[in-house]
Every structure is written in structure tokens, then in C-alpha cells.
Amino acid sequence: MSQRVAVVPGDGIGGEVLAEALKVASAAGAELDTSFFDLGAKRYLASGEVLPDDVLGELRTFDAILLGAVGSPEVPPGVLERGLLLRLRFELDLYVNLRPFHALASVGAGVPVDFAVVRENTEGTYAGEGGFLRKGTAAEVATQGSVNTRFGVERCVRFAFELAEARRRHLTLVHKTNVLTYSGDLWQRTFNEVSGEHPDVETAYHHVDAACIYMVESPGRYDVVVTDNLFGDILTDLAGAVTGGIGRAASANLNPARTGPSLFEPVHGSAPDIAGTGKANPAAAIVSAAMMLDYLGLKDQAARITKAVKDFEPPAPMTTSEFGDAIAERV
Ligand code: IPM
Ligand code: MN
């Protein structure tokens, strides 16, 4: 029985990298029933539509969503990010953003680097709380609150402990409890309580600024990291940069309760500066597709793809499709 996958190429290099991801999935033997959705800058500029309700309703009926990238210099910041990507994360209750990182052998300098960041994906500063007062005047006020619910933090922290159980049994909470004494306190207390149910998982706590140093100087110390939405956004770009480049960083926006489809996408953006040049690295999209296959139960195909990308260091610069072909041959 083939799985129904909604494919949203989006903007810039999104379509180019997804084409390689689908090529590799098919080479690995995954039979996917794909439907393409035209969402992103082009549709918005032509029609003013970002994510119509009926399209969202249709997306809900799929087994999974594979997304390329959204964002364009021709569209004001926030329109597509909030209206499309964040709306999907919130509406589909994709409360975990799981981002695994493996360093190429040449990066680890002897210490294997293999960790995963569990980023809370529906709350924090992303929730959209806040507003303007007296906008455009000299007395203007802008607030942007951070929303942290016990429910939202706990379900994310639980996911992270369960993931750590299945890995090397080490979990680090990253926050800024020395300054964010309300939200940080809620996170720390929740973390400590759930930790009591997982006595075999060793825990650590790092302030986010210190975590940035450790991530660069000794990323091998991490197994699973759990953190809030904004810290997770920033930390995972850094993690990508130190483990072989953001072009390799994959992600899964998960609804672990499986009340609807989960969404899989590379961490990188639409890179309009290199769109159409064949320079985009499809590794992140390919591994994101592998995470999707794994989530859909196609464990074998997923494992072969992940391994092929992990082991592959291109001998010379390759175009997007040459990279896709090379991985397709190895799965
Ligand atoms: C990411 C991206 C998004 C985010 C943007 C495009 C809204 O940077 O997935 O990390 O901030 O979450
Ligand atoms: Mn980001």
C-alpha cells in the first residue's frame, strides 16, 4: 500500500532539492503516492493567497507532507513564514521539531558527533503574542511575548526523554534560566519532574549562550538536546554549521500523537541567490525525506538513505542533481 505524500516545493531552491529527495526515495524502493501543492511566493504574488483553508483541509488528509523551503525577497518578511510554515506547524499540532546532526568524519576530529535537537515547535516567541501600541509614532511600543504552557513544555520534554532512552541516554536542557526566570523556571521544573520517570537518562542543563560555545568546541558531548522554539531555531543553524554545513541539516516537524500528518523539511531556507544554478546541496532534503519514510514505517529504506548520505563526502563539488544521482546509486 503506497503512502500518500503532499509535496510542497515552495520557493527558491525548494523544488530543486525536493526533486532529488524524491528521486532517492524512489531509488530506495519507497512507493509514494505524491500530490504537488503550489504554495509559496509565486502563488501569493499572483493571487494574494498564502494557505487557503480548503488547501489546509486537503493537506490534513495526507500521510505526510514534504516541504522544500519558503521565503522570497519579493514578499515582506513574515507573510509566508507565519502564514504558511508556522500556520502548518500550529494547525497540524507539529509540536516537536526534531533535528538530527551527524558530523562528517573530518569535522569530529576523532570524537564522533551525533546528536539530535528537540525544538518545541508551537509556543514560545513564535506563538505570535504581542502587538503594537501607537505604531509609527515616536512613542511607539512593540511587545512580543513568549508563551510557555505546562502542557506544551511537558509534551515536548517527554518526547525528548523518550528519544534519549532510545539513543545514548543523555539529555541536555538548554534555556536561559538565569534571566528568563518565569519561562525558564517552568521548563526546568517540568524537566526535573519528567526526569524522575527516566532515572536511566543522565541529564544536564546549559544556558543557551554557553551551549553555543560547547556546540562549536565540543559538540561530541551532546546526545539529545531539548529547548524552546527560538533557542532551538538559532541553535540548530549553529549545529548545522559545525556539522558540515546547513546544506546537510534535516528536520521533522512531528505530531507524535499522529492525529494528522507530520511535515518534513530541510532546515535551510529558499536561498534565492543560488536558485536555478544547480549549486544547492540536496543532502538536507534527502535526509528529511528519509526521516519521513522512517516515520511512515519504511524503516529499511530510511536507514539505507540516511547511511548513504552520512557516509558520502563528494570528491569534488557536485551539482544538485549529480549529488542526488550519487546517493540514488548508493541506496
Ligand atoms: C526554520 C526556519 C523557520 C523558523 C522560518 C522560515 C519561519 O528558520 O525552520 O528553522 O524560524 O522556524
Ligand atoms: Mn531556522
Image (cartoon, rainbow, N blue to C red):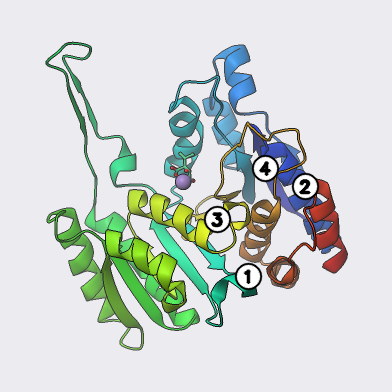
x, y percent for residue 134:
16, 14
Instruction: Give residue 320's mark.
Output: 2
Question: What secondary structure is found at the residue carrying circle 2?
Answer: helix
Give the residue at mark 4: 6
Which residue occupies 52% across, 27% down?
53
As drawn, 68 above or below 173: above
- What is the quadrant of residue 103 in the picture? bottom right
Inspect this view and state whether residue 151 appears: yes
Q: Do the residues labelled 2 and 1 touch (CB within 8 Å)?
A: no
Using the image as rendered, state which of residue 318 and residue 36 is in the foreground. 318
x, y percent for residue 35:
74, 39
Q: Residues within 10 Å of mark 2 (few under 14, many from 20)?
A: many
Q: Nearer the viewer, mark 3 or mark 4?
A: 3
**Is label 3's Cβ within 8 Å of ligand 1?**
yes
Quarter of the rendering occupied by the C terminus: bottom right
Which amino acid type corresponds to the residue marked 3 in the rendered image?
Answer: Ser
Give the residue at mark 3: 251
Sequence-wise, the earlier of marks 3 and 4 is 4
Give the residue at mark 1: 104
Sequence-wise, the earlier of marks 1 and 4 is 4
Question: What secondary structure is found at the residue carrying circle 1?
Answer: loop
Q: Using the numbered discs, state the Cα–Cα distance from disc 1 to disc 3 in whole angstroms.
A: 18 Å
Using the image as rendered, state which of residue 220 and residue 294 is in the foreground. 220
Q: In this view, does 116 lie to the left or right of 155?
A: right
- What is the quadrant of residue 1 in the picture? bottom right
Which amino acid type corresponds to the residue marked 1 in the rendered image?
Answer: Leu
Using the image as rendered, state which of residue 68 and residue 262 is in the foreground. 68
Which amino acid type corresponds to the residue marked 2 in the rendered image?
Answer: Thr
Inspect this view and state whether residue 31 appears: no
Q: Is residue 20 left or right of residue 182?
A: right
As drawn, 133 above or below 37: above
